[in-house]
Amino acid sequence: MAADPLSKVFAALADPTRRDMVARLTLADATVGELAKPYDVSLQAVSKHLRVLEDAGLVTRSKEAQRRPVHLEAEVFDLMTKWLERYRRQAEERYQRLDALLAEMPDDPGEPQPPKKSTTTTSKEK
Amino acid sequence: MAADPLSKVFAALADPTRRDMVARLTLADATVGELAKPYDVSLQAVSKHLRVLEDAGLVTRSKEAQRRPVHLEAEVFDLMTKWLERYRRQAEERYQRLDALLAEMPDDPGEPQPPKKSTTTTSKEK
DNA sequence: ACTTTATTCAACCTTGCGGTTGACAAAGGT
DNA sequence: ACCTTTGTCAACCGCAAGGTTGAATAAAGT
């Protein structure tokens, strides 16, 4: 365990059941039993899933009599979104650089990007 | 295996090494060996990681002599972003509904955050 | 006080993951 | 032709994930 936050979040959402729970929790808080109903697994299994989601910071559980209402914490989504956007943007920028490059292609085989080593940067095009 | 696409993508990104590879691939394509260099694991391990990323549709591998340049496929990010945005939006909307509700709350004394009973809003009758 | 409801804890089982090593395949360099 | 480079395939190992059942806990209901 002790995995970094991002790993935990991604791992938590890698399970379809857990993703479905999250989806339902966007609509309203729910107790463990309520959450468990649609799935064909034991209550204990659902409880475990919730623990995973909680450890990932995706949900919090409060107390209300014997019930433990589960509440979705949206903030963590931001963490993921940030990660995603960052690399998506970079990838896009790279596309643009590449496009620009191809646009003005003279015929020199020089390395335009300076990440040193011959980065296998599609230097050979079929 | 045959897991749904989204599960595969999330699972693939749940590993820090793989996330790092993806990060580096946003800068430039790279061969297996190049990708492996920074990590203290065998080449075979890296090869496996790449297979996972490939199965998730995050990268593609072409041939170039003995080398297998790995290329990042940005499209899959969109799938994730879509999922994320969808639920993030719903969660936000829910906040707003709640805010609106609290805003026009009649004169209630004391309790700022009314934990009330029946917070378990799911309107599930017994 | 006893029972029911709601949930967790504990032990266990099976599967899959990330890692290893060793052998093999294919393309190039010499 | 041979050897080197670059990767993959296959078998194996330890461990954590997701599931199960059974017992324990806690707060209401009666």
Image (cartoon, coloured by chain):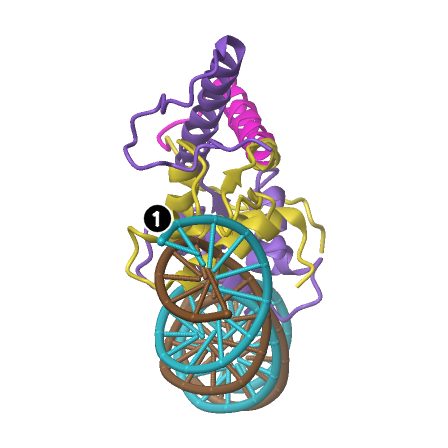
Chain colours: A purple, B yellow, C cyan, D brown
Magenta stretch holds residue B2: no
Instruction: Give the residue at x 45% y 23%.
Output: A94
Amino acid type shown at disc 1: Pro
- Is residue D11 left or right of C4 when viewed as pictured? left
From the image, tell me which residue sits under label 1. A5
The answer to whether any part of residue A52 appears in the image is yes
**Could you tell me residue D16's position as x and y percent?**
41, 69
Instruction: Give the residue at x 39% y 36%.
Output: A79
The chain letter for the residue carrying disc 1 is: A
Instruction: Give the residue at x 61% y 43%.
Output: A23
Quarter of the image that includes the C terminus of chain B: bottom right
Quarter of the image that includes the N terminus of chain B: bottom right
Number of other residues with Cα within 10 Å of mark 1, as a class: few under 14, some 14 to 19, many 20 or more = some
**Could you tell me residue B88's position as x and y percent?**
53, 31
Between D29 and C13, the residue placed more toward the observer is C13
Name which quarter of the figure residue A28 lies in. Answer: top right
**Could you tell me residue B57's position as x and y percent?**
61, 45
Q: Residue furthest top?
A: A104
When the figure is inspected, residue A69 is found, relative to residue A51, above or below; the finding is: above
Between C5 and A73, the residue placed more toward the observer is A73
Q: Secondary structure at mark 1?
A: helix
Q: Which residues are magenta?
A: B83-111
**Could you tell me residue B75's position as x and y percent?**
60, 32
Q: Main secondary structure of the magenta part?
A: helix
The answer to whether any part of residue A62 appears in the image is no
Magenta stretch holds residue B88: yes
Between C24 and A93, the residue placed more toward the observer is C24
